[in-house]
């Protein structure tokens, strides 16, 4: 059965950053790689993954790893060991140049996330942290919760901390839920890159938490400041 794959490419003429090539019909990852190479002769295929997969990108250099084991890139620390690297949303590769490496071989790698249940838990922990106005004492608690409850996602404190800091920390004071009632139709702005944003009906109001349901029957919880 054919699958949809996403291929990250570099080395395309006059393109200093990566490009995303989408294969709508490919037998497997090797077939998707072949299609990308045929479409862009001479390009460098960095990584291939199914388009529906959840995860992030990281930067890896085999030549840097061969020098001292620090083959992963960190925006803060430069080349570092596995676990200390920066993670990027897939679309960010089209805005970021790859760093210089000893062998000029830095590439983007796709890192698959864990089960959807752990992703949902991680999103809820982050939302709770943000709703608390990012108080300093709460950072360690949130990081520990992420590592304990989502071990497949966050093997290191650096990964957990980076996940918390993905959201903008401005204007986080929750809006008063006044004016909303059970049965009202509202628009929810999903903080997870807008994946589930849309119109929902309010089923229940629990303080700053709204229980919402969309036309497809999907039920979710959202903070008051995410709803308008």
Image: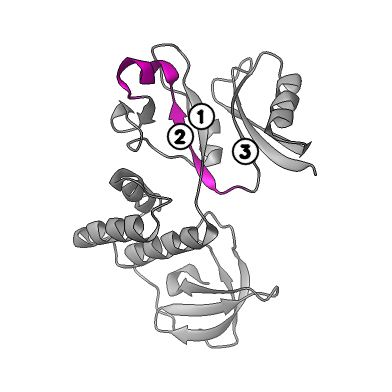
Residue 49 is tagged as: 3
How packed mark 2 is, by other alpha carbons closer than 10 Å (few <14, some 14-19, many 20 or more), is some
Residue 76 is tagged as: none
Which mark is in front, 3 or 2? 3
Which mark is in front, 3 or 1? 3
In the image, is residue 138 above or below residue 209? Answer: above
Residue linked to disc 2: 58
Which residue is found at the position 23% from the left and 57% from the top?
A: 140
Q: Quadrant of residue 159?
A: top left
Q: Secondary structure at mark 3?
A: strand
Residues marked 3 and 2 touching at CB (< 8 Å): no
Residue 5's x, y, as percent? 69, 38
Residue linked to disc 1: 108
Q: If you read the primary sequence from the N terminus, does the residue marked by circle 3 or circle 2 appear first?
A: 3
Which residue is found at the position 61% from the left and 16% from the top?
A: 14
Residue 141's x, y, as percent? 25, 61
How packed mark 1 is, by other alpha carbons closer than 10 Å (few <14, some 14-19, many 20 or more), is many
Which residue is found at the position 50% from the left and 24% from the top?
A: 107
Which residue is found at the position 61% from the left and 75% from the top?
A: 200
Q: Secondary structure at mark 1?
A: strand
Q: How many marks?
A: 3
Q: Which residues are magenta?
A: 53-70
Q: Quadrant of residue 43?
A: top right
Dividing the image into 4 quarters, which one contains the N terminus?
A: top right
């Amino acid at each position: 059965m054919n699958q949809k794959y996403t291929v990250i490419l570099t080395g395309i003429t006059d393109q200093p950053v990566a490009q995303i090539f989408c294969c709508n019909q490919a037998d497997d990852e090797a077939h998707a790689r072949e299609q990308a190479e045929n479409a862009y002769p001479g390009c460098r295929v960095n990584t291939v993954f199914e388009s529906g997969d959840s995860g992030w990108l990281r930067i890896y250099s085999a030549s840097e790893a061969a020098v001292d084991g620090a083959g992963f890139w960190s925006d803060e620390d430069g080349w570092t060991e596995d676990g200390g690297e920066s993670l990027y949303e897939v679309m960010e590769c089209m805005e970021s140049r790859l760093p210089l490496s000893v062998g000029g071989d830095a590439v983007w790698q796709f890192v698959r996330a864990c089960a959807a249940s752990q992703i949902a838990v991680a999103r809820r922990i982050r939302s709770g942290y943000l709703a608390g106005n990012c108080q300093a004492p709460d950072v360690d608690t949130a990081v520990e919760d992420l590592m304990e409850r989502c071990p497949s996602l966050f093997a290191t404190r650096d990964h957990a901390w980076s996940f918390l800091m993905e959201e903008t920390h401005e204007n986080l004071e929750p809006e008063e839920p006044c004016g909303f009632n059970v049965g009202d139709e509202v628009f929810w702005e999903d903080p997870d890159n807008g994946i589930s944003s849309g119109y929902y009906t309010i089923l229940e109001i629990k303080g700053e938490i709204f229980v919402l349901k969309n036309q497809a029957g999907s039920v979710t919880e959202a903070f008051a400041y995410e709803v308008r």
